[in-house]
Amino acid sequence: MSGEPMLWSGWGDPALARELPEQVRALLRDFLGVRAPDAPAVGLESVRLPPVALSEPLLGALAGVVGPAYVLTSHEARVRHTRGKSTPDLLRMRAGDGSAAPDAVVLPGSHEEVAELLRVCSAERVAVIPFGGGTSVVGGLTAATPDSGFTGVVALDLGRLDRLLSVDPESLVASFEPGVRAPEAERLLAAHGLTLGHFPQSFEYATLGGFAAARSSGQASAGYGRFDDMVVGLTVATPTGTLDLGRAPKSAAGPDLRQLVLGSEGAFGVITSLRLRVRRAPEERRYEGWRFGTFAEGTAAVRALAQEGPLPTVLRLSDETETMIGLAKPDTIGSGGSGCLLIAGYESTRASGWGSVAARQAGAAAVLSRMGGEPLGAEPGEAWEHGRFSAPYLRDSLLAAGATVETLETAGFWANLPRLYDAVRLALAGALGSPLVMCHVSHVYETGASLYFTVVVAQEGDPVAQWERAKEAANAAIVTAGGTITHHHGVGREHRDAYAAEVGPVGVSILQAVKARLDPAGILNPGALVPPTA
Ligand SMILES: Cc1cc2nc3c(=O)[nH]c(=O)nc-3n(C[C@H](O)[C@H](O)[C@H](O)COP(=O)(O)OP(=O)(O)OC[C@H]3O[C@@H](n4cnc5c(N)ncnc54)[C@H](O)[C@@H]3O)c2cc1C
């Protein structure tokens, strides 16, 4: 990363933007019939924004809380805080559609300033969208529409709340402000010989507050756990007051209210600090590849590891199509092999209690061999490790080349996984004709796993409408086949209706009651997560 702000119309560090390799262009032509000439994004200055709806006195009131330097209404600041990074978000931004821009970007510098902003915005009916790294892929950052009864919309950028507050090496707990980005969190912890071990593909830009708010899960979840498992305490500013939760690792003191904040996506309050379980930084890392004949055989092997152990730190099994395309190794895409590629990674410290890397690797190898796996050595694992954050950069080049590429994910119990896998693929094929649908398993539990799909299709007509039809079909298939609507991307606006179906009318009424209690004016991320009261 060069330290540049993220590309406003796409993913990541603009310095790392990549040309589409010729073998990928050939795949697009031969598999998908993509023939359109490349269509670049409009310039930032050409993005069409609605006029600023917030009045001067209101902007003045916000500046009174955080200081005038931290209330931004410039074209660039508004564009950079418009929407998140899903493919529909990017397609709209590339076309210059800034209709979902906030009126202003406000950057608070403390918990007290957040609390005061929420008071002012509640009194004046200004919608507030908490903004971490801006990497939401579920419509979690889309501003409310101008006709929704708000006097305006602010993006509450938490980037100034970027400190490591304390480290307790005895308990292995570190306290952070929410705006710390993942690489900076790792850098700060490394100075203490510690790590969080949270490496989602959005690692370069996403923040700790965003991980907690959206229940993120990283590539090393088999070893380090999901992000919500790492959160031992939270401080949350709400329009009704402050919540301070978590004074012991586990407790029998009633329902665990931390769970109400985790996954609340800015709809109940703003996380202003987090206490996180950390681990000692690994002294040794090894990655390797295995091949299985079929996805079913590979899935059985992954289940055996999840249920019997020893579990690697990283575990990822690609299906036949993903293996053939070579998606697990984005730097050499287009040169995959046959069967199903499994990547296993092992990280350890002498004091971690996980046993040595060599012992865990040997134990896992015995299970994988018994289940029919063929060892491929270190090269595929190291290639995966090298390219682990590069795939999103490829998406921008594919969008420019006339192909839509998007991901979606779900999770289910082992016994239901094959049905879920078939249902989603069938729904996508039904909605899109002949898309390329790839899948991998990368988050495993004793009782089940997640399925992560990548879809590539030639753009036809309005590509946003084309994708939305496919997404709707996939969501319906997931609900009908008994999976959860999301394992780690969260709910936002895109999954809200399917989430409502998942928790049922009583569940929805609980969410609405909590929202009404904590946010009586309904200003916090309106439209996200919680269906409106009828
Ligand atoms: C290319 C790419 C790869 C991705 N890979 C993964 C992956 O591997 N694993 C994974 O789990 N996710 C992944 N994601 C999704 C996304 O990165 C996660 O949802 C992440 O948790 C979002 O963090 P953020 O800081 O960017 O939050 P944002 O996108 O800024 O916000 C996410 C939601 O949380 C709310 N929010 C943010 N900060 C706070 C706060 N302090 N208090 C209250 N609410 C807040 C926002 O209002 C919004 O609703 C990926 C996204 C992209 C674009």
Image: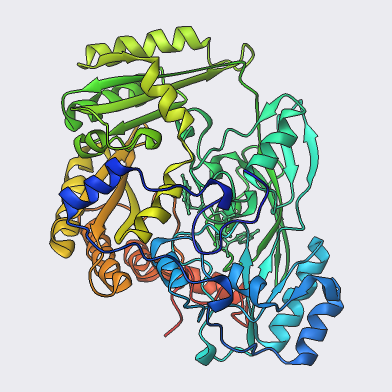
Q: Quadrant of residue 61?
A: bottom right
Q: Quadrant of the N terminus?
A: top right
Numbered marks: total: 0
Q: Quadrant of the C terminus?
A: bottom left
Q: Position of residue 412 (x, y in %)?
A: 29, 45
Return the residue nearer the eye: 430 or 129. 430
Tell me if I can see residue 95 in this picture. Answer: yes
Q: Is residue 497 left or right of residue 470?
A: right
Tell me if I can see residue 255 in this picture. Answer: no
Residue at position x 37%, y 60% in the image: 400
Q: Is residue 209 left or right of residue 310?
A: right
Q: Identify whether 395 is placed above or below 364.
A: below
Residue at position x 18%, y 27% in the image: 339
Q: Quadrant of residue 143?
A: bottom right
Q: Position of residue 135 (x, y in %)?
A: 53, 57
Q: Identify whether 32 is placed above or below 143.
A: above
Return the residue nearer the eye: 125 or 235. 125
Q: Position of residue 99 (x, y in %)?
A: 50, 81
Coloring basis for residues: rainbow
Ligand 1's image quarter is: bottom right
Q: Position of residue 180 (x, y in %)?
A: 70, 49
